[in-house]
Amino acid sequence: MLSISSIPIGAAACTATTLIPYVEMVVRCRRLVGVMGCVSGGGKGVGEVAASRAAVVALPAVEVEAGGRECVICKEEMGIGRDVCELPCQHLFHWKCILPWLKKRNTCPCCRFHLPSDNVLGEIQRLWEVLV
């Protein structure tokens, strides 16, 4: 069980006052999901879910500055000066490739970094994994 005393809190009081209620809320949500039986023992109870539209709209477009970068979805090289999508994990993809992917999944195709989703149980699981 996660307890507040096991979380290292820095010297800044504002960090502690912000972090503690967040952690407590995620712990309560995790317990609720466990009691409801929505998450299996391995934590794989939530299947593939789409990334939230708000998260996708907020993704930045960056310009490719160096050649030799490849989109892992279509395996084509990203042209220098072309605008591509950058996920929070800093992996780059063609927009035409990543948008259909994110309509089905909320993970990075390279590293499986989880983006926010509109699925409540999936979000509780994602936030729990971030805390743990």
Image (tube, rainbow, N blue to C red):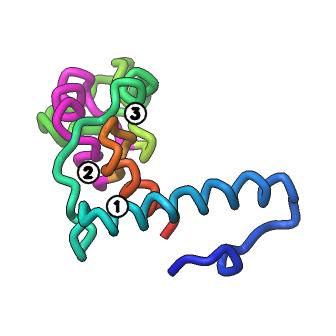
Give x and y (percent) for residue 77.
21, 32
Could you tell me which residue is drawn at 28 percent across and 46 percent down?
Answer: 107
Residue closer to the observer: 75 or 79: 75
Q: Which residues are magenta?
A: 91-112
Identify the residue under disc 3.
86
- Magenta run includes residue 102: yes
From the image, state whether disc 3 or disc 1 is nearer to you: 1
Question: SS for tag 3?
Answer: strand
Residue closer to the observer: 51 or 121: 121
Q: Residues within 10 Å of mark 1 (few under 14, many from 20)?
A: some
Whole-angstrom CA distance, mark 2 to mark 3, is 12 Å
Whole-angstrom CA distance, mark 3 to mark 1, is 32 Å
Identify the residue under disc 1.
33
Residue contact between numbered discs 3 and 1, judged by CB atoms under 8 Å: no
Q: Amino acid at mark 1?
A: Val
Q: Amino acid at mark 3?
A: Glu
- Magenta run includes residue 109: yes
Q: Which mark is residue 110?
A: 2
Q: Is residue 84 visible?
A: yes
Q: Amino acid at mark 2?
A: Cys
Could you tell me which residue is drawn at 40 percent across and 21 percent down?
Answer: 57
Could you tell me which residue is drawn at 76 percent across and 69 percent down?
Answer: 9
Give x and y (percent) for residue 1.
50, 81
Q: Which mark is residue 12?
A: none
Question: For residue 35, which quarter of the picture?
Answer: bottom left
Question: SS for tag 2?
Answer: loop
